[in-house]
Amino acid sequence: MPHATTDDGVRLYYEESGSGTPVIFVHEYAGDHRSWEAQMRHFGRRYRAITYAARGYPPSDVPENVAQYSQARAANDIAAVLDHLKLDKAHVVGLSMGGFATLHFGFRHAARAHSLVVAGCGYGAEPDQRDRFRAEAEAIADFITQNGMPVFAEKYAYGPTRVQFENKDIRGFAEFKQQLSEHSALGARNTQLGVQRERPSLYDLIEPMQALAVPTLVLTGDEDWPCLQPGLLMKQHISSAALAVMPNCGHAINLEDPDEFNRIVASFVAQVDAGRWPMRDPRAVTASITGMR
């Protein structure tokens, strides 16, 4: 099985399909590399599509020490996969936990990104939700430790921004839930405590957002409530960013509506590759509503 090795010795399992400009997909907390199958098939027709299992997600290594899990590590692990494949740059597409990792990859490794797709990014970011999110992360870790992954999957899969997926696609939702139940309990626990609970709020990252010039697409479902306001925040402060909202969609948008997700992302990547992705026109940034004074 192919693995890339990080600078702290963690082996990351990866898969790839196709050839051409690299596009790497970074999964969410409740998913793994298998979550991107529809994207690997679609983008592998025209690009070198790559995905990997994050640390803590077999067949990648599952470090026992929570200290080996962090937001910085999650961003640097993307670079580790690119290093192993001897790739200077790639389009980086991340959802949720992977969206946070993608954004931080842009902060830390901007020269290595053709573009960034920051999808479903925002859970716990709003200042008045920070304490609640941290408490829920600890509750999740405790629940997994006490009950195991199959019981956890039966509960977590029915969150308020995931039931939309079940309503649209019963078979797809059942597959998602089954795959979640197969995750490592230790890896899922440590990821909650080291990455999810400890990541900085987006509202504390406005300065690095304002410095980011990599072409960026912020993408969210309109029923993914915790990500709507943070999505607007990123759109407002990243001058190279566009915001796309998928209608009647929850959190797992790449699974819930893969055709629409692929269409939006493919159009974005094509514009970037053509050199046609714009920076925000400074004339659009004004205190005036209409331009008249």
Image: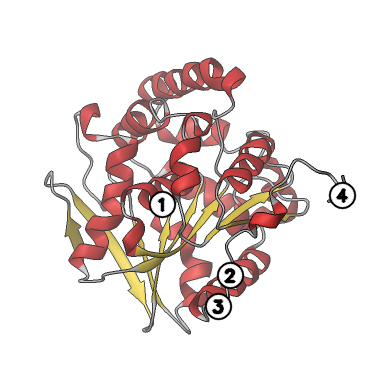
Residue 58 visible, this orientation = no
| Quarter of the image where the C terminus is located | top right
Residue 243 image position (x, y, % from top left): 66, 54
- 34 or 197, nearer to the observer: 197
Residue identified by numbered label 3: 270
Mark 2 and mark 3: span between their CA atoms? 5 Å
Q: What amino acid is labelled 2 in the image?
A: Phe
Q: Is disc 2 in contact with disc 3, using a CB cutoff of under 8 Å? A: yes
Q: Secondary structure at mark 2?
A: helix
Residue identified by numbered label 4: 290
Is tag 3's residue or tag 4's residue first in the polypeptide sequence? Answer: 3
Is tag 3's residue or tag 1's residue first in the polypeptide sequence? Answer: 1
Locate residue 211 relative to residue 293 in the image: left or right.
left
Residue 146 image position (x, y, % from top left): 38, 19
- Mark carried by residue 32: 1
Q: Secondary structure at mark 1?
A: loop
Residue 172 image position (x, y, % from top left): 61, 57
Mark 3 and mark 4: span between their CA atoms? 32 Å
Closest to the camera, between mark 3 and mark 1, is 3
Q: Secondary structure at mark 3?
A: helix
- 167 or 271, nearer to the observer: 271
Residue 49 visible, this orientation = yes
Mark 2 and mark 1: span between their CA atoms? 24 Å
- Residue at image location 65% in from the left, 60% down from the top: 281
- Residue at image location 31% in from the left, 30% down from the top: 190
- Mark carried by residue 268: 2
Q: What amino acid is labelled 3 in the image?
A: Ala
Q: What amino acid is labelled 4 in the image?
A: Thr
Instruction: Decide: few, some or many residues near mark 4? Use Cα within 10 Å; few <14, some 14-19, many ≥20.
Output: few
Closest to the camera, between mark 4 and mark 2, is 4
Residue 82 higher or lower than 290, as above or below: below
